[in-house]
Image (cartoon, grey):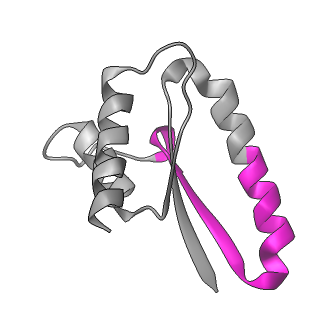
Amino acid sequence: MQHIKLFLASSNKLKAERQQFETEISRKNKLWHDQAVVLDLDIWEDLTTRMSLTRSQDEYNKKIAEADVFVLLACNKVGMYTAEEFETAFGHFKDK
């Protein structure tokens, strides 16, 4: 079974778009089940940070570093934390 880890970054304002993306990933998982491919999607709402010793963003950045694919949704601006997530992902891309 091949697992592909995805991280979806976006502001809270794009909740509907994140939900649609999550729906599409679910459909792909059903379609690719017979080929033994699984897309594992992480979005910030699903990540618990209650046990974090630092800030929540550090926990998100760890998941970004583990991801095979990073997706950023943006509309008219990119917030401070979303920009940090992009920089984290881009830094790992350059390193690999």
x, y percent for residue 41 = 57, 55
Q: Which residues are magenta?
A: 23-46
From the viewer's perspective, tell me whether residue 47 is left or right of residue 2: left
Locate residue 76: give its quadrant: top right
State the residue at coordinates (58%, 75%): 3
- Asked if the stretch drawn in magenta spans residue 11, the answer is no
Total marks placed: 0
Identify which residue is drawn at 32% across, 28% down. Answer: 81
Q: Which residue extends farthest top?
A: 76
- Which quarter shows the N terminus? bottom right
Query: Which residue reaches farthest front?
Result: 94
- Name the residue at 70% across, 42% down: 21
Give the answer, above or below, for where 93 lies relative to 79.
below
In the image: residue 83, left or right of residue 16: left
Is 68 rendered above or below residue 58?
below
Q: Is residue 64 left or right of residue 28?
A: left
Q: Main secondary structure of the magenta part?
A: helix
Residue 35 shown left or right of residue 6 in the figure: right
Q: From the viewer's perspective, is residue 6 above or below residue 29?
A: above
The foreground one among 3 and 51 is: 3
Expressed as whole percent of the image width and height from the top left, the position of residue 91 reads 27, 52
Quadrant of the snapshot with the C terminus: bottom left
Q: Position of residue 37 (x, y in %)?
A: 70, 77
* x, y percent for residue 20: 74, 37
**Is residue 44 one of those drawn in magenta?**
yes
